[in-house]
Amino acid sequence: MAIHVEDDLAEQTVPPAGGWGSIKSVVTYLTRELVPAAALKALAVQNKTGGFMCVSCAWAKPEHPHTAEFCENGAKATAWELTSKRRTPEFFFQRSLSELESWTDHALEEGGRLTAPMRWDPATDRYVEVSWERAFDEIAAELKKIDPQQAVFYTSGRASLEASYLYQLFARAYGHNNLPDSSNMCHESTSVALPKSIGVPIGTVWLEDFRHADCILFFGQNVGVNSPRMLHDLQDARRRGVPIITFNPMVESGLKFFDNPQSPHDMLLPGHTQVSTQYLQVRPGGDIAALAGLCKYLIERDDAALADGGKRVLDTAFIAEHTHGFDDLAAVLRELDWRDIEYESGLARVDLEQAAATYAAAKAVIAVYGMGLTQHREGVSNVNMLVNLLLMRGNIGRAGAGICPVRGHSNVQGQRTVGITEKPKLAPLDKLKELYGFEPPRTPGRTTVKTCAGVIDGEVKAFIGLGGNFLRAAPDTRRLEDAWRRLRLTVQVATKLNRSHVIHGEVAYLLPCLGRSEFDRQASGLQIVTTEDSTGHMHASHAVAEPASTSLLSEVAIVAGIAQRTLPANPRLTWREWTDDYALIRDAIAKTWPEIFHDFNERMDTPGGFPRPNAARERHWKTENGKANFSVPARWTAASDDAVSHEAGVLRLVTVRSDDQFNTTVYSDEDRLRRVQGRKIVLMNGEDMADAGLEPGSLAALSTVFGDGIQREVAGLRVIRYDLPRGCLVGYFPELNALVPLGHHAKESEVPAGKSIPVRVRAMQLAGAVAS
Ligand SMILES: Nc1nc2c(c(=O)[nH]1)N[C@H]1C(S)=C(S)[C@@H](COP(=O)(O)OP(=O)(O)OC[C@H]3O[C@@H](n4cnc5c(=O)[nH]c(N)nc54)[C@H](O)[C@@H]3O)O[C@H]1N2
Ligand SMILES: Nc1nc2c(c(=O)[nH]1)N[C@H]1C(S)=C(S)[C@@H](COP(=O)(O)OP(=O)(O)OC[C@H]3O[C@@H](n4cnc5c(=O)[nH]c(N)nc54)[C@H](O)[C@@H]3O)O[C@H]1N2
Ligand SMILES: [Mo]
């Protein structure tokens, strides 16, 4: 199924991203959160040099920012952090945790910022205020009782480079590499694919490349919602006539039309700027096949050119000088049947050929992608296949071209850079030994999936969460919740209350921390923290607001406080001094990775950030064979290869974010851009609805087809007819996470495969009998 936007302009069915709707939404939002007037100033300096770096997405911060360098969702995230609402100890005194368990995710978080450190009291089933000193001492005592391998230190991608560096140092000095972070549920497929294919773990595109690109491809990334500031770059590109080709099962508004709230021209003229020039509604998991189709077309045209002396389509000089493995891939693609490509991708050959011709006509192409590629069984192959397409025409290491994974959390990429990884090979263990004189553990640590498995089988005894909402974000919710209560120790460092706090271990602490926007005063004065954006640029973040409570500590102080009490004294691990002055932590980071972070304190306020070196941009390939590598995918679909998932009646469920949520933080039940109200819903193709005996408004139950003998069902989902390919269902993360089996993850990267979950759909009541 394909939509050609040119033909479709008249019957616009989705509201544009940005525009008046989004301004209205921000204003409503700021009012509802009772944001103090002073905090509104925060928005004026958001994502600007000398200002603070947004806590929402990781998209690049330009050297020359727009007047308001924030988007609707960034403004919401700031307001959510700077709200004047509070969850004080009195609130917890009045409610048991069993009572709070019945609350919705929205209700738990919506009450505002946590204000004081608390410990769970088993006698009353309540969180009760405790002093920081006592909390640290008791947590340290618990950690000393267990084997360090039984502890997991999780990070959600928000904590600064400074806090993250101390956190991994603590884990390793204590004795484990169990450092999963949200990236293990997110772009780990990228981090596994790219080092082997192009020799860097991150993308190769910088912001300036958008000004030189003459074609942009989008695979499975919902820019209008999840990285809206990128719309500026896309709009500029469209004004230059750059074609944008989108592959996505859903027609996402931000990829279709754009109204720029900062451009009076856009706001006043009827009709909206087109974003995508060609929109291909690929089947979930169909991108390997779609990309194979594009590559096959290039090879066929190149073969023809070679035969009749025409202009070559492939960049043969680049392929010969810089790459390995092209001939193997080309041989397989020449044999591949177009009917198989059409079947697996759900796309017509003619549409794929049109896209390939546009690609072939461009000199510099950027390929952008997100969770639509990484969260599949063959998520790593998805990324590799995209690299194949780019390498064929030398679109890596050229101005205006490259691969552009859009990272999620605002510092998730940076956390990996400063050593948050469960893979000992990726951590500078020898360097840590040299600098700090302890023997770092060499045993591989636990990914998210292995953490869940360890919690379920009882091997994991202690869980520390530096932010995030692990229990809600992880797969197999129900199995995990039951097992979670058997943990000996849970410690959650957080800004707001969520489900991972109300379900807890035998000994449980809830430790409230400063948000990035809040003044962090230590012995040496006001502190600055740093983050890395999605394009590998490092930025200082200067706080803008008074802390939500005088009892809050910074993440740095909390990590250092627990570490100091847990570890034997080591004069080189200067936890106190680091807490007093974060510039010393940055010095330590610079000593650990001088190539990336030399002169860190001097460079951190560089406008637009300072880039980390990126060898692939220079066409220097840090792979084992010193080349950029083509690869042949093991299969032509990224979805499951289990026989049961191909039985008749099994559909592919995609879990996505709505317009009004940030991961497990649900701002409201409205998904404005998709015009969907309510979160217990499932979007379906009309023909699939008819097959299942469903009508709009019917209630349905989804059950997972996985073949491990475990029943997984989510019932009571309201059915909404939606423009989707056949066999594809869409619903919301995290409500549907109970359907994601722990074993259903990307093969090499272990990213839970939340984008093509094999399910059956069952009508719960007679169609039409349910009021909406
Ligand atoms: N406002 C807001 N911003 C966010 C977040 C948020 O929750 N709210 N989350 C942050 C985080 S941590 C992350 S990782 C990013 C996530 O940002 P995205 O990568 O955009 O993730 P999703 O919302 O999961 O949507 C993925 C898109 O992939 C499409 N898709 C699904 N399956 C397939 C497929 O098989 N092939 C293709 N081609 N497309 C497919 C879906 O229709 C959807 O449009 O956003 C970050 N930014
Ligand atoms: N089915 C399905 N599952 C998914 C996904 C999917 O698309 N589908 N997406 C996956 C992805 S991409 C990701 S990244 C994960 C997200 O997983 P997480 O990162 O674990 O979850 P978040 O919802 O971002 O965490 C929100 C909580 O973080 C805390 N918090 C906010 N700011 C701060 C801060 O500054 N410091 C501290 N210490 N705490 C803070 C608040 O208490 C808030 O409740 O979910 C994954 N799970
Ligand atoms: Mo993410």
Image (tube, rainbow, N blue to C red):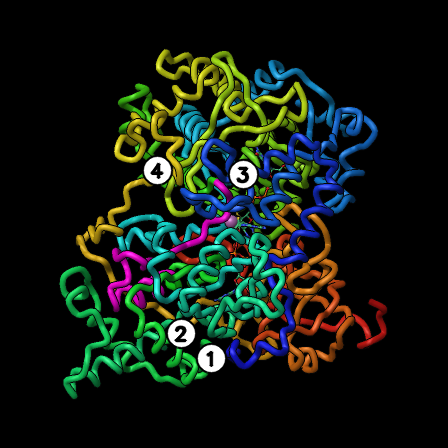
Per the image, the residue denoted by label 3 is: 46
Give the magenta range: 383-410
Percent coordinates x, y for residue 129 in the rendering:
72, 20
Residue positioned 28% across, 28% down in the render: 431
Which residue type carries mark 2? Ala
Asked if marks 4 and 2 touch (Cβ < 8 Å), the reply is: no
Q: Amino acid at mark 1?
A: Leu
Percent of width and height locating residue 482: 66, 44
Mark 3 to mark 1 CA distance (whole Å): 41 Å
Report which residue position mark 4 lands on. Answer: 610
Q: Nearer the viewer, mark 3 or mark 4?
A: 3
Drawn side of residue 718 relative to residue 60, left or right? right
Residue 105 at least partly seen? no
Please state if 446 lies on the left or on the right of 731 as rendered: left
Asked if residue 454 is positioned above or below residue 772 in the image, the reply reads above
Relative to residue 91, is residue 716 depicted above or below? below
Tell me the amino acid under the disc marked 4: Phe
- The numbered mark, 4 or 2, whose residue comes first in the sequence reads 2
CA distance for labels 4 and 1: 41 Å
The answer to whether one can see residue 514 in this image is: yes
Q: Which residue is mark 2?
A: 289
Q: Are discs 4 and 1 less than 8 Å apart at CB?
A: no
Tag 3 secondary structure: loop
- Please identify the quadrant where the C terminus is shown: bottom right
Regarding mark 4 in the picture, which secondary structure is present there? strand
Distance, label 2 to label 3, CA atoms, is 41 Å
